[in-house]
Each structure stands twice: as C-alpha cells, then as structure tokens.
Amino acid sequence: MSEWVIVAIVGVVLLFSARKLPDMARGLGQSMRIFKAETRGLREDEKAEKGTANDTAAPQAPGRALDEAPSNGTTPAPQDTPAPRPGSTSS
C-alpha cells in the first residue's frame, strides 16, 4: 500500500474523528438505498408508461384536449362547476 493512501486515511480519521465516521457511513448507506429505490421506481414508471403508450393510437400532451376546441365546428360541452362549500361566502 502506498504511503499516500495511509496518510489520506489518517487525515480523514483526524479530520472527522473516529466517533463520527460510523455515523457518516451509516448515513451514506441509507442515502444510497433510498437512491436505488427511487431509480428503480422511475424505471418501473417508465415501463408502465411505455405499456400504456403502445395501447393508445395517438398520444397527446396533457391538457391538450382541454385547450383546443373540437375541429368539427361544435362547441365543447360545458364543464361541471364545483358546488360551493358549506359556509363559503362567495356567490
């Protein structure tokens, strides 16, 4: 082993103290597990999106159907308005 590696290890131990090193390693391990779980979840979400995208004929951007009027010249059906909450003062 090179003497520079030994010097670096001694420097890290002196810099962070021997008591804090196990806590730091535990925190690093927990963050790596969380990171792996999140990336695994993202991959599963992408697979699910690809599966549903193959089922539809023409994918659209979200909200696109709400922004555009139908091309056949008719007006879109009115949206249901939410019922006022009990005790609200707006009319």
Image: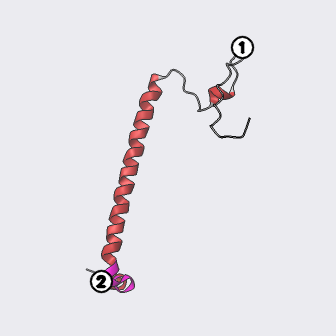
Secondary structure of the residue carrying tag 1 is: loop
The quarter of the image holding the C terminus is top right
Q: Is residue 15 above or below residue 75?
A: below
Q: Residue furthest front?
A: 87
* Secondary structure mostly seen in the magenta stretch: helix
**Residue that carries the numbered disc 1 in the rendered image:** 74
**Residue that carries the numbered disc 2 in the rendered image:** 6
| Image colouring | secondary structure
For the residue pair 11 and 45, the one nearer the viewer reads as 45
Residue under the point 69% across and 16% down:
71
Locate residue 45, reporting x and y percent. 42, 39
Mark 2: few, some, or many residues within 10 Å (few <14, many ≥20)? few
Q: Of marks 1 and 2, which one's residue comes earlier in the chain?
A: 2
Is 3 situated left or right of 83 in this image? left
Inspect the image, locate mark 1, and give the three-letter code of the amino acid beneath it.
Thr
Is 70 situated left or right of 48 in this image? right
Inspect the image, locate mark 2, and give the three-letter code of the amino acid beneath it.
Ile
Q: Quadrant of residue 48?
A: top left
Residue under the point 63% across and 26% down:
65
Q: Is residue 6 above or below residue 53?
A: below
The quarter of the image holding the N terminus is bottom left
Segment tinted magenta in the rendering: 13-20
Q: Quadrant of residue 81?
A: top right
Mark 1: few, some, or many residues within 10 Å (few <14, many ≥20)? few
Q: Is residue 77 magenta?
A: no
Q: Residues at badges 1 and 2 in contact (C-beta under 8 Å)?
A: no
**CA separation in Å, label 1 and label 2:** 79 Å
Q: Is residue 25 above or below residue 6?
A: above
For the residue pair 62 and 2, the one nearer the viewer reads as 62
Locate residue 47, reporting x and y percent. 40, 36
For the residue pair 3 and 24, the one nearer the viewer reads as 24
Is 74 situated left or right of 34 in this image? right
